[in-house]
Image (spheres, grey):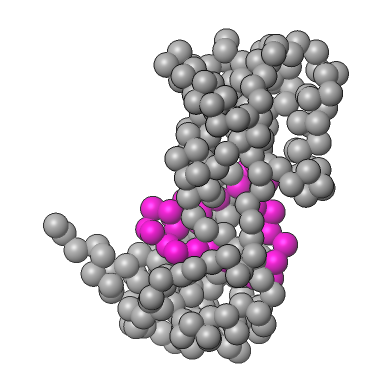
């Protein structure tokens, strides 16, 4: 079916999904971009609808994805370039947009392995940082990314874009702090918090066991309540006049230090 009017009901429904309220009400999220959509499919996501605009697609070989998604049972709609640009989130649209069921985020659905490596986002709000952390988590093989306190908008299109679709490749969850701490203790997972005021450099801590690395909000840092329950506090040494790193950078350093200690960075 081809849609050429911006007043079409399907187009108006797509516009609703640009807001968190609309996404929560529909139980859907948007995945825009060929690479992001391909990663989502590889990770098991099943779109309910695909919207594409052939004249905006940059490589004709990508059009095989249309039939692939149709075979998964999704509705497929061809949009005129003008209409597609109305619903696209990006300024330079590449002609691909899909509706996907929102990720389930219950803590109970996680099944971490023995000695898991987990990343906890304690109040990180900026979509770019959340997406970058998810991308690092996927690259490093992190077992889950958990938001605590809950309320993170995992379906924000900017999170999907910044994660390059890795949102669908890494288990995500959310929980209140008390629930999460109890869940971690039951699994003998230690809590390691990133704290610029800590006296221990991050390379000095033992991160070989099951560990949840906790990073705080961009502006206010880590809440005192997380420092109170921490098994270890980690500091990334700073040698310039800035007193902290971007939260996604700090998370990446701590995650890869844990991998180094586990021998996963050894040369083949």
Q: Nearer the viewer, residue 186 or 128?
A: 186
Counting from the top left corner in percent of width and height, residue 238 is at: 43, 71
Q: Is residue 96 visible?
A: yes
Q: Is residue 31 visible?
A: no
The question of residue 68 being in magenta is answered with: no
Q: Nearer the viewer, residue 7 or 207?
A: 7
Counting from the top left corner in percent of width and height, residue 172 is at: 57, 59
Q: Quadrant of residue 95?
A: top right
Relative to 265, 176 lies left or right: right
Q: Which residue of the protein is positioned furthest toward the left in this rendering?
A: 268
Counting from the top left corner in percent of width and height, residue 208 is at: 33, 78
What residue is drawn where x is 24% and y is 62%?
265
Q: Quadrant of residue 147?
A: bottom right
Q: Which residues are magenta?
A: 131-159
Q: Nearer the viewer, residue 223 or 211?
A: 211
Q: Is residue 66 above or below residue 140?
A: above
Q: Is residue 250 above or below residue 139?
A: below
Relative to 246, 174 lies left or right: right
Relative to 99, 110 lies left or right: left
- Location of the C terminus by quadrant is bottom left
The question of residue 153 being in magenta is answered with: yes
Q: Quadrant of residue 3?
A: top right
Counting from the top left corner in percent of width and height, residue 250 is at: 47, 65
What residue is drawn where x is 78% and y is 24%?
11
What residue is drawn where x is 64% and y is 65%?
106
What residue is drawn where x is 62% and y is 29%?
74
Q: Is residue 256 above or below residue 57?
A: below
How many discs mark residues in the rendered view?
0
């Amino acid at each position: 079916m081809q849609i050429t009017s911006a007043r079409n009901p399907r187009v108006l429904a797509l516009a609703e999904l640009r807001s968190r309220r609309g996404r929560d009400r529909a139980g859907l999220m948007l995945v825009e971009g060929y690479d992001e959509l391909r990663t989502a499919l590889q990770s098991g996501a099943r779109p309910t609808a695909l919207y594409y605009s052939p004249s905006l697609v940059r490589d004709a070989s990508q059009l095989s994805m249309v039939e692939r998604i149709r075979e998964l049972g999704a509705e497929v709609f061809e949009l005129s370039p003008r209409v597609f640009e109305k619903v696209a989130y990006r300024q330079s649209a590449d002609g691909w947009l899909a509706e996907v069921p929102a990720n389930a985020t219950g803590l109970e659905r996680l099944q971490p392995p023995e000695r898991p490596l987990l990343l906890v986002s304690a109040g990180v709000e900026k979509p770019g940082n959340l997406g970058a952390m998810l991308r690092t988590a996927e690259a490093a093989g992190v077992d889950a990314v958990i938001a605590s306190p809950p309320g993170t908008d995992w379906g924000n299109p900017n999170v999907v874009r910044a994660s390059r679709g890795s949102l669908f490749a890494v288990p995500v969850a959310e929980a209140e702090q008390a629930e999460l701490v109890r869940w971690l203790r039951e699994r003998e997972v230690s809590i390691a918090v990133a704290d610029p005021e800590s006296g221990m450099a991050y390379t000095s801590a033992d991160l070989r066991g099951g560990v949840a690395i906790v990073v705080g909000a961009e502006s206010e840092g880590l809440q005192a309540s997380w420092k109170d329950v921490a098994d270890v506090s980690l500091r990334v040494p700073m040698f310039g006049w800035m007193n902290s790193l971007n939260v996604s950078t700090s998370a990446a350093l701590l995650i890869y230090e844990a991998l180094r200690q586990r021998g996963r960075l050894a040369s083949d």
